[in-house]
Amino acid sequence: MSEQRRIGYRWNLRTVMAQRNLWKTTELMPLLRSRGINLSESQVYRLVTSTPERIPARTFAALCDILDCSPNELFEPYVEMRAAASANAPRRSEDLGLKPGDPVAYRIRLLSDDEES
């Protein structure tokens, strides 16, 4: 039985924009352009409203500069842990007492059926 370990992340661009009083995606476009990032209206909208699977480093750096924030404020990684399908384990990390964003490091030892007695 093997453990599956997945890494998740939160994309907080919309929240950080709101904290900086930027409410519309169209307000972000000229700020990006002034830093050499030319994205269409629909690309900026998707960048703000959905979680990107990949983002160019220059775009990410420009967002940090525009919003005067650190990369950690925009991009928040966390560990999701799931047991193998044959295990009788909780499906959500919250059921294990884990919170997204908290570091998770546990050493476990799997026992065979012979060792359990």
Image (cartoon, helix red, strand yellow):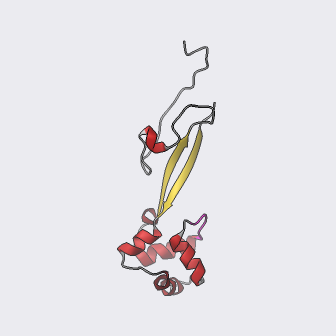
In the rendering, at what x and y percent does residue 48 appear?
51, 73
As displayed, is residue 21 above or below residue 16?
below
Query: Which image quarter holds the C terminus?
Result: top right
What residue is shown at x 50% (from left), y 43% (from top)?
92
Q: Determine whether, in the image, residue 19 is placed left or right of residue 32.
A: left
Residue 53 sits inside the magenta stretch: yes
As displayed, is residue 29 above or below residue 111?
below
Query: In this view of the protein, which residue sits in the foreground, 43 or 59?
Result: 43
As displayed, is residue 28 above or below residue 2?
below
In the rendering, at what x and y percent does residue 91 appear?
53, 41
What residue is shown at x 55% (from left), y 78% (from top)?
44
Q: Quadrant of residue 114?
A: top right
Q: Quadrant of residue 116?
A: top right
What residue is shown at x 46% (from left), y 85% (from top)?
27
Q: Look at the magenta stretch and give its main secondary structure.
A: loop
Residue 72 sits inside the magenta stretch: no
In the rendering, at what x and y percent does residue 89 appear?
53, 34
Query: In this view of the protein, which residue sits in the foreground, 8 or 31?
Result: 8
In the rendering, at what x and y percent does residue 1 appear?
63, 30
Q: Which residues are magenta?
A: 52-56
Furthest-top residue in this view: 117
